[in-house]
Image (cartoon, coloured by chain):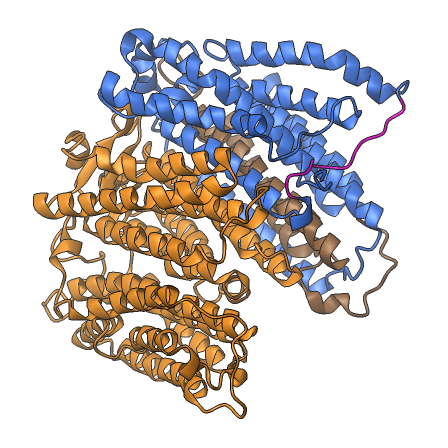
Amino acid sequence: MSLAFALDAILGLAVLAVAAWTIVARDAFAAIVGFVAFGLLLALVWVRLAAPDVALTEAAIGSGVTGGLLVAACSHLRGDAAAAGIEQPRAILRLAAAVACVVVTAGLAAIVLLLPDPAPTLAPQAAAQLAQTGLGNPVTAVLMAYRAIDTLLEVVVLLLALVGIWSLAPDRFWGGRPGLRQHEDPNGMLVFLARLLPPLGVLVGIHLFWVGAVAPGGEFQGATVLAAMWLLAMMAGLVDAPPIDRRWLRLALVAGPAVFLAIGLAGFAVAGAFLAYPPDHAKLLIVIIETPVTLSIAATLGLLVAGPPERAPPG
Amino acid sequence: MSAATLFGLCGAALAGLGLYGVIVHPHPLRKILAFNLIGGGVFVILGIVARRGAAAGFTSDPIPQALVITGIVVAFAATALAVALVLRLLHETGWVTLRPDLAIGARPDDPHC
Amino acid sequence: MPNAAIVSAGTTPGGFLLVLAIMLPVGGLLLSFLLGGRHAERVAIVVMPFGVAVAAAIAAGVWRSRNVLQYVVGGWHPPLGVALRADGLSAAMIVTAALLVPGIGLFARAQFATPPGAEARAPLVFWTLLLAVWAALNAVFLGADLFNLFVALELLTFAAVPLVCLDGRAETLAAALRYLLFALLGSVLYLLGTVLLYGAYGTLDIALLSSRVRAEPLAWVALSLMTAGLLAKAALYPLHLWLPPAHAGAPAPASALLSGLVVKAPFFLVVRLWFDVMPGLADRAAAQLLGALAAAAILFGSVLALRQARLKLLIAYSTVAQIGYLFLMFPLSGKSQVGHPWGNSAWTGGVLQAVSHAFAKAAMFMAAGLVYEALGHDRIAGLAGIGRALPITIFAFGLGGLSLMGLPPSGGFVAKAMLLTAAVAEGQWWWALVVLVGGLLAGGYVFLVLARALADPSEPLTLLTPIARTRQMLVLALALFAVLLGFVPLRPSELLMIGRPHPVVLGFK
């Protein structure tokens, strides 16, 4: 057993321990903090699995933004202080659940051990076609070229989630701004961070998106950092959430998928197939798609966390 | 046992733990949290499939990696929608359980979220 | 099952229509959302005829070429890339969606018209999500890649869930949350199965998988997980608890969409899995288990429908029951004992049930919606006199009921007759019994409603609002579609057989 394997084993156990804490913690806030820690440890697992793009995405979206969303939700629930009627499950249910947990774990573990060796893989084909896409990062090639239709539909899924969240607002709030107006102490720490970090964060986000063509990174990771900076500014009260019926906001949200779809359809004429790229200009077209997509995803992620409108529009 | 298999077993355990959490916790927010654990476990299993598919100069098969990234984004969107529904349900009714009969004569002193 | 060789055929002529079928509604929903206000509805209305044309062209293309239409997206051939495929089954479902979605949209114009002035919540959300559901349905019916289908399923869930709680009441919010949680559970199970299949065979393309899958534990587990997840989404007993409150609580056009089309998509995928991806894997026991769950759905759903006091809940429980008929297709699709392949009958019966139920149920929910608008409630006990006030509506409801009961002329009759024939010929008479009992029970609850509706009221009935004749005619038109399907010849359909080996059987005896 080598040192690397021992360290991996420790990491795996740590992940399970934190996950177990998340389940058994009595206080929901503690569970959510544990979940954020779990996400960061999981990102380390992804690094050990030689998947840095996934590690970045897990840390940013799986841990960071999800954690922020859950913490905000938890504080809402505490504020209302009326979440009554929660009955703790009977011991028999716990026992049945524990049995189910063990059975499922054992079954999945057996399946994992049954995976064929040598494992089938598409890496050779991906490598062979990589030059045609003009990209250096194979994961970006899969997302933006080989399986671009999945990415296009996924961006639409994100937008739909936002429409769904907005639909939950009462009729009188429609057209208003999400969340409540934040009033923070202008000399406090939060406002200080919100003045300091966003310019740097925006640069980091743009860099992450830009470098994704050749190195780990890409539009999702970059967009998450941009969204996080926007959320920070909103939480500190430096900017207010925009009213949801503004045309410019709708344009920002729709621009990404719309450009993606437009260039995809143009592929019919220019490159012979939907979402095909002419070989010489593939990288250029991919960057042209990715830029508005990053913007749209950033706006969508930020608004997903901000929630449905909670203030009536003026007039 | 390789690192990939080790983490695969870890992923299996995560899925089991998450399932326990989904069944046992009555509060929807904790259920959603546990759901994310199940998702994490499934993604890890996909990740070890990628790792085992290392070939042609890549240390990991890029297709499953892209699938995981798509999955993480979709899972976040699902969490956001579910959380928004839970919050709205609370605002409308004052209770956060999926069993409305519990709201009548409910205990007001629950210290948890 | 489609030959793996089809993958090398590349993009067939007319394949671009498959892309348009998905991307036209996507473009529409983006435009609706962007422009907002009154434009959202207008964009939806404009997209509809084009969508119908594309669907008709796809069906015509499949019929003329007697072969599967295929499109290789981006020029990247599977297994590296993603393909779209349309066989006879896809064509039938695409045309059904293309006829129902515009019908529901036109019906909903009165209810979700945008008021003048500022943008309103419900209309914008409705029109955007209507187009999204259409796009997602087409993506499911045309998808040929398991992960692409996963994304399409998520698209469908996110589009359908907010439609349930569009009116903002607490009950519908709880129903929407329960629907979302069941749907997410289904998605996770489906994804896990997909992961295992890729790990075992290195591809996600359905045609390629069909040639690589072997009968081994990994494949069995993957098939079971994916089927279980899809059953949760399709609300097959015992995972049906979320459906009645969700479908009953949604506004009437949304209920029609949900019961008519949305719930058929996971069934469609179970069919794809069992018949296309892993036909050799299904064994008799598994198929009989699926049939047992289907029988339980038919019996429990129908009995519970009889006990409902509210019309929309009755119709929703009826959906639970009718979904059971769909899954009876599986135990009847084995290699025949008697040497005649009756699998084709079961195949045609199951698909015809899906299509005719879509039209019939949509018409019934829309009729219930009109009744609610007219009376201000949908209590069955209080329906007396509505038959005189809205005769066309109640007549349409009755026509839809014919399909549920399996009485001629109706698509439901042909479907159930084919299932009955297959059951009797195979010697599995117990399914025939279930079909007959289900039909009797359906007759019970349909006549329950009709009898109340046609009864004389104790005092003269005044309607809350007048109901436009055009809306009633629209409901009638959809119900008539279900009746027209009854004139389909009582034998296996040639259209539905395109793209399948003959006979259409699963692997067991």
Relative to A12, say whether C47 is above or below. Answer: below
Residue at image point 33% right, 31% down: C202
Chain A rendered in what hue?
Answer: blue
Residue C498, horizontal then vertical, whole percent: 14, 50
Q: Colour of chain B?
A: brown
Quadrant of the image occupied by residue A304: top right
Q: State whether residue C192 is above or below residue C34.
A: below
* Image quarter of residue A225: top right
Task: Let me know if residue A170 appears in the view.
Answer: no
Q: Is residue C130 above or below residue A202?
A: below
| Magenta stretch: dominant secondary structure | loop
Name the outermost residue toward the front: C116
In the rendered image, the residue lying farthest to the top is: A280
- Give x and y (percent) for residue C96: 28, 55
Residue C281 in percent (x, y) is at: 28, 52
Q: In this view of the protein, which residue sits in the foreground, C289 or C205?
A: C205
Q: Give the position of the C terminus of chain C as an image quadrant.
A: bottom left
Q: Nearer the viewer, residue A96 or C494?
A: C494
Name the residue at 53% across, 80% down: C462
Q: Is residue A189 above or below residue C33?
A: above
Could you tell me how many numbered marks the image carries?
Answer: 0
User: Which chain is painted in orange?
Assistant: C
Q: Position of residue A33 (x, y in %)?
A: 76, 34
B49 or A62: nearer the eye?
Answer: A62
In screen coordinates, is B72 left or right of C448? right
Instruction: Determine if the magenta segment contains residue C482.
Output: no
Magenta highlight range: A174-185
Residue A184 is a magenta residue: yes
The answer to which of C116 and C79 lies nearer the viewer is C116
Question: Which residue is depicted at the point 24% across and 42% down?
Answer: C54
**Can residue B22 be seen at all in this image of the molecule?**
yes
